[in-house]
Amino acid sequence: MQLLHGSKSSKVDLPPERGPTIVVLYLPLGGGHKSAAEAISDALRRAEPQLRVQVVDLASALFPRLKLSSTVSAVYALLVRLLGGRLHLAIYRFADRRPEALVKALDMVFGRELLRFITGRSPVAVVSTFSVVSALVAENLATTDIPVVSIVTDAGRVNRIWTVGSPTRILTADFKTEQLWRASGTAVSNCKFVGPVVHQKFIDAPSRSLAKRTLGIDVDRFTVLLNMGLLPPRHRIRRFISELSSISSTIQVLVREDARLNGADDEIIVRKSSSDLQLVGLAAADVVVGKAGWMTLNEAVVVGRGVIIVDAIPGQEEQNADYCVRARGAVALGPAGAARMVSNMAAGDQEESVLPCWSDEAVSAASSGATLAALEIIGLIEERRSCRG
């Protein structure tokens, strides 16, 4: 399939054609948006090997000298900890109630630089895995014929800011999202359900025993992957570790190497790098325990690992947790209840600790979402090419 090398516009002067480039944008708020960007990038390259797919941290790209990426990450980590995450929830709700006002304010600061950055790459399409970025890009490219695609990285009734600017296509991870938007009075005509966008490497994940040997950990010990994303551990996760340490010393818990757990029992903690834990750590685990980040939840779906959710950042993660509980492979428990369940699982107590398998629908959606999203994006590019004649 031959894709166009550039775009034309009657209102914005674009630079010369430089051949089929798709720009995939994210912001470093946690690790999930980057994971989704890498997943769709991989799927696009597999679908069309000749594509040039650029995955870009927009915070770093726009103003590299200001080190915005690390600042954005630090501010987000602070927001989700302060007042138990209630400040983050307040901002989330404001963005949902007044999305146009928020985007307009941000556009006044970043819009001109954003347009210059994107058009300088002459993309045949722009993809975003973060809501605010999607809205800003859609607003700024409205006078061009460059398709803008939003990859929604959450479930349920997601924030209305995803709809601002009317992206060419909004690809949802949960089939209920569009229904819930419409029920709340949000007009959308450009949505399409594709499923969660999960990287192919999780579909090809190694066996549990091979993953344990790769990590150099005890193959016979019951293994927990502690999921905190890239954030510092919040209170409920630290409490879970404390509770588990007090009732079992035979379990090994895989933890990100820089995580501070306030005196957790070293007998059960095994520290590894984030890069090791993302795929191999998940494959090595008997169960995942932690927060309700959308990407890790669906990576667990694909790899076939049950999840115990002990923490959900107020706002969107609560709906992500509901989705996964409905999909049967996850339970939501308090720290003490989660510790008891893990201990029972390690002891082989089936009556007290069985996590059902993920539903066939959840597995199918997470396994095919990236491919379907890539095909949709390529289809939009072909459609624009045909319209140009």
Image (tube, rainbow, N blue to C red):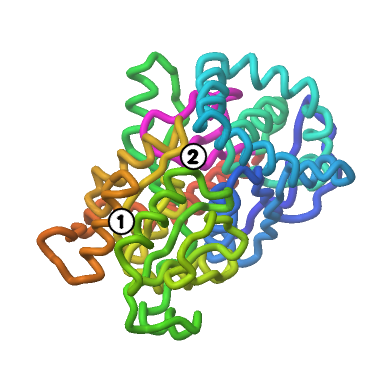
Task: Report crowding for label 2: few under 14, some 14 to 19, many 20 or more residues within 10 A (C-alpha).
Answer: many
Which residue is rendered at x = 64% and y = 30% of the image?
A: 138
Q: Can residue 307 be seen in this view?
A: yes
Location of mark 2 (residue): 152
Q: Which secondary structure, mark 2?
A: loop
Above-or-below relation of 19 to 85: below
Graded by Cα atoms within 10 Å as few (under 14), some (14 to 19) or many (20 or more), the crowding at tag 1 reads many
Residue 366, position in %: x, y?
Answer: 37, 55
Task: From the top left corner, tell me how far across and down residue 246 is, in percent.
Answer: 34, 60
Q: What stretch is highlighted in magenta?
A: 147-171
Q: Is residue 126 left or right of residue 319?
A: right
Q: Which residue is drawn at 38% across and 62% down?
A: 245
* Three-letter amino acid code at the position of disc 1: Ala
Residue topped by disc 1: 339
> Percent x, y for residue 140?
72, 28
Residue 364 in sight here: no
Seen from the viewer's position, the closer of residues 134 and 321 is 321
Does the segment drawn in magenta span residue 177?
A: no
Which of the two residues, 347 or 34, is positioned nearer the viewer here? Answer: 347
Please identify the quadrant where the N terminus is shown.
bottom right
Q: Quadrant of the C terminus?
A: top right
Give the mark, 2 or 1, whose residue is nearer the N terminus: 2
